[in-house]
Amino acid sequence: MWTAVAEIAGTSKEQVRAALDVVEELVPEEDGAAEVAMRAALVEKYNTVRPFLRLLGESKALSAAPGGRRVLAAVRRLPELSRRQVSKKPLLPTVGLFRFRLL
């Protein structure tokens, strides 16, 4: 792999590895703080956008692509989910869930 990277970069494997060492030194290790901050910001903004959730679910633009149809189906469930009590029913069906992570 290092040979292929060096060929594409037009340099030696040693220079690529040295550059990687510099990047690892300069870029802090991910501790999840960015994701926590994003979730906190979303919680604060939820009350602002809540009145528009029903309108968003009626949008024709989201059904323009096959991937958009899945998003639209999920968006249409948002008003229902916002009224549920978590302790009584699961928020999401257990079939077909995907786990997303920040890259």
Image: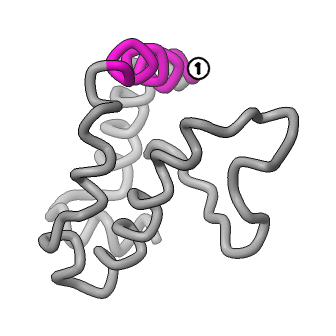
- Say what secondary structure mark 1 lies in: loop
Q: Number of callouts in the render?
A: 1
Q: Quadrant of residue 59?
A: bottom left
Q: Which residue is mark 1?
A: 31
Q: Is residue 39 above or below residue 40?
A: below
Residue flagged by tag 1: what amino acid is it? Asp
Q: Quadrant of residue 43?
A: top left
Q: Residue at x 32, y 44 (%)?
A: 53
| Within-10-Å neighbours for mark 1: few <14, some 14–19, many 20+ | few
Q: Is residue 96 above or below residue 25?
A: below
Instruction: Provide residue 68's location: percent of width, then percent of height.
Output: 29, 74
Front in this rendered view, residue 18 or 43: 43
Q: Residue at x 73, y 64 (%)?
A: 93
Residue 18 appears left or right of 74 = left
Queried whether the magenta region covers residue 48, the answer comes back as no
Instruction: Provide residue 1's location: percent of width, then percent of height.
Output: 46, 71
Q: Is residue 39 above or below residue 89?
A: above
Q: Is residue 46 above or below residue 80?
A: above
Q: Residue at x 34, y 74 (%)?
A: 4
Front in this rendered view, residue 10 or 75: 75
Q: Residue at x 34, y 31 (%)?
A: 50
Front in this rendered view, residue 103 or 50: 50
Magenta-drawn segment = 31-47
Residue 43 appears left or right of 101 = left
